[in-house]
Image: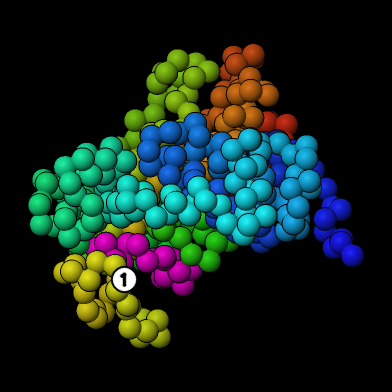
Amino acid sequence: QRSEAEFVTFSVPSYACQRRTTLNNRNAVLTDALSLLADNAELTGDEGRGVAFRRAAAVLKALPKPVTDATQLRGLPCLGEHSLRVINDILEDGASNEVESTKRSERYKALKVLTGVFGVGVKTADRWIRAGIRDLHGLQDSGPALNRAQQAGLQHYDDLNQPVTKAEADAIAEIVERAVASVSPGAQTTLIGGFRRGKPTGHDVDFLITHPEEGREEGLVPKVVSWLESEGILFYQKTTRNSYLEGKESGPGRPSSSMDRFERCFSIFKLPKEEKRGAGQTHGAACGPEAGHKPWRAVRVDLVVSPVSQFAFALLGWTGSKLFERELRRWAGHEKAMSLSSHALYDNKQRRYLRATSEEEIFAHLGLEFIPPSERNA
Ligand code: DCP
Ligand code: MG
């Protein structure tokens, strides 16, 4: 007797921002495989193919049951020939040759390790690989000039590649709130990124800060940074100033789509370890200066400051997931002739900005059903 699931066929809308995607992924084996191929495509500079794999994975994440037979996928959007082939191989043989050989490939492994260093992007990693550097030992020994971010990234490699837990994110939130309250009473701090979507772990902790009085948020980051530095909490920070000018930056109707211009701080925090969390283990780079036990751990923290008039857009734009954001912008552009950024929503037909003070209003402007953060895990 065939299992009931084989007869289930699925139906999902084609944009990820039209779907509810919780963290309860019933097709993790398939989506892990497609995500790995997406990583590989992005690491080799093939962004288009990367997005195609991410869209395919996102469709599977939205299914209410595990896929057991390829016939169940008929009619689903975003499943190209290549993705379908990978899915078929896994359903039939339990594994995909392409995925397994990618995992084993020296180039993929080297790109993963080197881009795992904070401050190192694909181009830099590629250049190093061509110079014969394949791992952290090679990087330390043959020593290409490292910038300040990369030096910090290498020094804290183990910590920064160990997922941040929700408990650690909460501990960081307490510190950030204390810092913000002491330099700007009345300013508000919101946990954003993956933790706002309910993820149990993340690669960093993201915060959005605003002040209810427009303008009072200006210059907040340098003050917060000084406070944190005086408390000895920062290993590294790089602050960028707000450079957003509504309607001026790239002409009306064309807010630069994925880059945003907020006052922002990329940092590495020194988080004291709670005894309860247990002794720290080190992975991989046992050669690092951090090997052994220590009473703290390094955590990547991003601070973003938004004027209150842009807060809803910043909140929506920084909650993610990355694919959900990309799909929102694609929906806005292709289906509504609007341009969405983390600052604003511009209606190209009416030739005006559409205001919003909540995420709900933005979804309404876009003609989309509201999807709460916990269901944006595409
Ligand atoms: N974001 C974006 N585009 C960027 C950078 C960020 O859309 N170029 C948004 C979407 C992300 C959010 O900001 O969800 C935070 O970025 P992260 O890289 O920290 O992503 P997450 O917090 O979602 O994941 P992780 O748990 O790995 O930190
Ligand atoms: Mg994050």
Foreground: 359 or 277? 277
Q: Position of residue 239 (x, y in %)?
A: 27, 44
Foreground: 346 or 325? 325
Whether residue 223 can be seen here: no
Q: Which residues make up the magenta segment?
A: 156-172
Foreground: 101 or 124? 101
Q: Position of residue 33 (x, y in %)?
A: 54, 52
Kindly identify which residue carries mark 1: 283
- Residue 85 is covered by the magenta coloring: no
Q: How is the image coloured?
A: rainbow
Q: Quadrant of the image for the N terminus?
A: bottom right
Count of numbered circles in the view: 1
Residue 165 image-quadrant placement: bottom left
Whether residue 326 can be seen here: yes
- Disc 1 marks which amino acid? His
Q: Is residue 344 left or right of residue 176?
A: right
Q: Is residue 123 left or right of residue 307?
A: left
Tell me what residue is drawn at x 71 percent, y 36 percent.
77
Helix, strand or loop: magenta stretch: helix
